[in-house]
Amino acid sequence: MTRYLVLLSFAACAFGASAGEDVSFATVDANSDGFISESEFVSWKTSSGEVSPADALIKFIEIDSDASGMISEAEMDAAMAAKSEQESDHGAASEKRM
């Protein structure tokens, strides 16, 4: 269970292309089939030039929690929720130090 939570945490951090980016599932799902394929994800993730194709592929694998080769909207939601939770945990830890 801990391993799953750690992987999910990394995946959530990996999903955003840049700090503060708010992306919708439909934005990445270029062919609107209800899933994000590896090629759609890598294309989207590398479009800014800040992420290499290899790093994008690693991030895709981390988010694809059921290893289906596609990211479902539920997997994306889980990654985004974990990212949000991690950010709020980080903020709470920062406030405690003050």
Image (cartoon, helix red, strand yellow):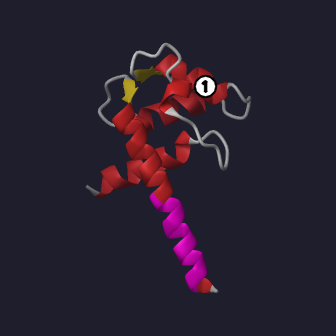
- The residue shown at (38%, 32%) is 73
Our reading of the magenta stretch's main secondary structure is helix
Q: Which quadrant of the figure has residue 23?
A: top right
Q: Position of residue 63 (x, y in %)?
A: 42, 37
For the C terminus, the image quarter is bottom right
- The residue shown at (43%, 53%) is 82
- The residue shown at (25%, 55%) is 1
Answer left or right for 38 relative to 2.
right
Q: Looking at numbered disc 1 in the image, what kind of residue is underneath it?
A: Trp
As drawn, 11 above or below 53: below
Indicate yes or no whether the magenta region holds residue 91: yes
Farthest residue to the left: give it: 1
Indicate yes or no whether the magenta region holds residue 29: no
Q: Position of residue 72 (x, y in %)?
A: 36, 29
- The residue shown at (38%, 23%) is 70
Q: Position of residue 14 (x, y in %)?
A: 54, 43
The secondary element bearing badge 1 is classed as: helix
Q: Position of residue 76 (x, y in %)?
A: 42, 38
Numbered range of the magenta stretch: 85-96
In the picture of the structure, the residue carrying the numbered disc 1 is 44
As drawn, 69 above or below 14: above
Farthest residue to the top: give it: 31
Q: Which quadrant of the figure has residue 16?
A: top right
